[in-house]
Image (tube, rainbow, N blue to C red):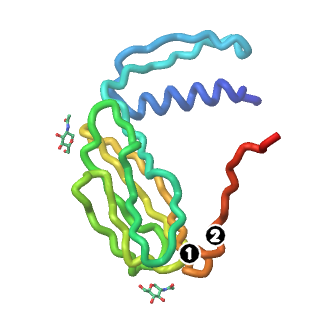
Amino acid sequence: MAVCLRCRVLALLVLALLVHGSVQSCAEFRDGQAGGVVTLCSGNEDKPPIADAGADVVTRAGEVVMLNGIESWDDKNITKYEWTLNSGNQSVRMEKTHFVDQCRLSNLYPGVYRFRLLVTDSAGQSDTASVTVLVLTQEQAEGHTSSVRCERNQD
Ligand SMILES: *[C@@H]1O[C@H](CO)[C@@H](O)[C@H](O)[C@H]1NC(C)=O
Ligand SMILES: *[C@@H]1O[C@H](CO)[C@@H](O)[C@H](O)[C@H]1NC(C)=O
């Protein structure tokens, strides 16, 4: 039996909302193709947060890098930002700063590092995001320098 994609998506949505609990109101939608009626519930009082670990970073060995989670979103308040090293040289130093969303990286050795950000909101709901830090050797970094020409042609 073929179940239409839209029906499956809607079913998953309903399931996700039910699993999330605190369902307040429901609405019915008629599915034209399948001819059925789909009930969607919404009205979660507290939406789960959306983690944003910022843009990937390219740097060189010896530099200090700040990871920022400030672009993370919540409808109320994010109460916790937790940064962890997923992969990369374990000798990286990770320190808190006076900004709650921030993590200061130092002792970066050339290579690829992956960090994970876990944010938790005031309702205890959480989300994760990750960011990659590419650390170049001095030689690689020099190879990356480029020049720019920016001028108006004279007629
Ligand atoms: C948000 O959570 C932080 C950390 O628990 C807290 O310091 C801050 O006062 C809260 N802000 C609001 C508006 O509730
Ligand atoms: C990890 O970094 C240290 C320096 O902090 C370096 O001596 C070591 O060779 C690095 N390991 C790898 C696998 O790159």
**Residue of label 1:** 136
Residue count near mark 2 (Cα–Cα under 10 Å), binned few <14, some 14–19, many ≥20: few
Q: Quadrant of the C terminus?
A: top right
As helix, strand or loop, the secondary structure at mark 1 comes to: strand
For badge 1, the amino acid type reads Leu
Where does residue 42 sit, x and y in percent of width and height?
42, 20
Q: Is residue 33 left or right of residue 56?
A: right
**Residue of label 2:** 144
Compared to 30, does 12 lie above or below?
A: below
Q: Nearer the viewer, residue 25 or 108?
A: 108
Can you tell me whether the CB of the residue at mark 2 lies under 8 Å from the nearest atom of ligand 2?
no
Q: How far apart are the two marked residues, 2 and 1, measured between alpha carbons?
A: 9 Å
For badge 2, the amino acid type reads His
Nearest to viewer (mark 2 / mark 1)? 2
Where does residue 40 sit, x and y in percent of width and height?
50, 18
Residues at marks 2 and 1 touching, judged by CB atoms closer than 8 Å: yes
Q: Name the residue: 41% across, 79% down.
A: 90
Q: Is residue 51 left or right of residue 122?
A: right
